[in-house]
Amino acid sequence: MKTTLSIIKADVGSIGGHITPGRKLMDAVTRHVDTGLDAGLITDFSVSATGDDIAILMAHPRGVGDPDVHRLAWDAFKRGTEVAQDQGLYGAGQDLLVDAFSGNVKGMGPAVAEMEFEERAGEPFLMFMADKTEPGAYNLPLYLAFADPMNTAGLLLGPELTKGFRFRVMDVGYTAGDRVSELDAPEGLYDLAALLRDNNRYVVEAVYSRHSGGQAAAVSTTRLHNIAGKYTGKDDPVMLVRVQKDFPATGEVLAPFATAHYVNGFMRGSHVGPLMPVTRGTGISYFDGPPVVSCLAFCVHEGRLTEPVDVFAHPFWDEVRTRAAGKALEVRRQGFSGPAMVPYSELEYGGIVSILERLDKRFRIRAPAVAEAAV
Ligand code: F6R
Ligand code: MG
Ligand code: MG
């Protein structure tokens, strides 16, 4: 049987700043999605929060980009926005960039990651939710999980994995439409690395098994600030990864997150910080961060989901969190200087643009010194 998993996530308001959405708002979103279950539109769903974002995971048989499924999520976020406004939450409705829904939430603000597949007898998958960062934050973990035998033992030991994986990479710097390219690992490893080192520009959108052709991963590649033309919140990406057998094992997909690698985002979407693996529902704190990622593991059968397992709630990750906090403190010691703040082109707030325009007028071309002029 073919099942589609759709994650649609948005920030429609939070308590105490850009921290966490709060119970009432979550309940309002959940109640609305539940009407889709009652109506038979979806077969199951799960609603969760990470940082200030709410992610709706839906299972259904309707394929990717289904207008009715997207509308269900959009309307749920609208209901949530009403509660957020009623409670005076901060940033109420901030990711719903247009007033009226028009068929597909892609490009309207919410982030989307979807895939359709033939269910295996046992169908385990992972749902990742990141806050205070951008879609390219998943580049390194995906590269390590699907292309590096130093991380993924299955690339050496699993017969279904030794053929490697196909990566679809999106050029998110291109705003006139979708610009994508496919690269195969292991042959194209260096080409892949050449693209994926630049998280701002090239983002893994999907990964496929070269053994079965089945889709392994789907990442939301929306860039909110491209859509809005101005800052409305970092993209805060979500990702689905199918695991085991034809795909890396759950632990191989999780292992790269132990690096707590540095990503863009953090305060005002304009700084560099470590991606800290956190438990479901964790809010935001130090310097509006650090960037966080949570991960829920599920199985799906005939479109019905098991209860989620919070994989970063395991004691192992406490040590990683401590290290991530250390990395966050370390980079913050240098404030705005050099790589602690993202380059000019990536800044999410425009204030500095007017400062630089004003200061530009104070620069003058100095006349060459006499000795230089004589040469
Ligand atoms: C970053 C983020 C926060 C805000 C910051 C200022 O993704 O959400 O760091 O950018 O708290 O927010 P405003 O401009 O809403 O006061
Ligand atoms: Mg926000
Ligand atoms: Mg957010």
Image (tube, rainbow, N blue to C red):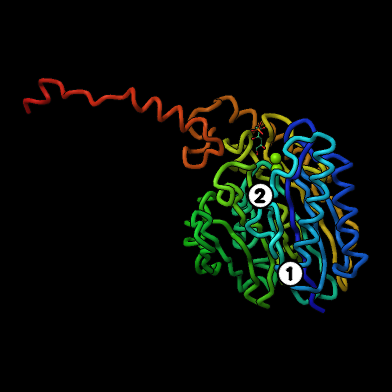
Mark 2 — residue?
Answer: 97
Q: Quadrant of the N terminus?
A: bottom right
> Residue 206: percent from the left, percent from the top?
63, 64
Q: Amino acid at mark 1?
A: Asp
Q: Which residue is mark 1?
A: 66
368 up-or-down from 93: above or below: above
Residue 52 appears in the picture as rendered: no
The mark lying in front, picked from 1 and 2, is 2
- Write the residue at 69% across / 62% down: 102
Q: Quick one: which residue is furthest to the left in this view?
A: 374
Q: Under 8 Å from ligand 2: the CB of mark 2? A: no
Which residue is at the front of the view, 366 or 202?
366
Task: Name the residue at 53% across, 55% down.
Answer: 172
The residue sitting at the front extreme is: 100
| Residue 263, percent from left and from top | 60, 43
Q: Crowding near pointer 2: few (<14 within 10 Å), some, many (20+)?
A: some
Which element is circle 1 on? loop
The image shows residue 71 at horizontal and vertical percentages of: 77, 61
Q: Where 72 falls versus 323 (above or below)?
A: below
Q: Quadrant of residue 325?
A: top right
The residue type indicated by label 2 comes to: Leu
Q: Residue at x 17, y 23 (%)?
A: 367
Q: CA distance from mark 1 to mark 2?
A: 20 Å
Quarter of the picture holding the C terminus: top left
Name the residue at the right extreme. Answer: 38
Q: Toward the viewer: 369 or 329?
A: 369
| Secondary structure category for the residue under label 2 | loop
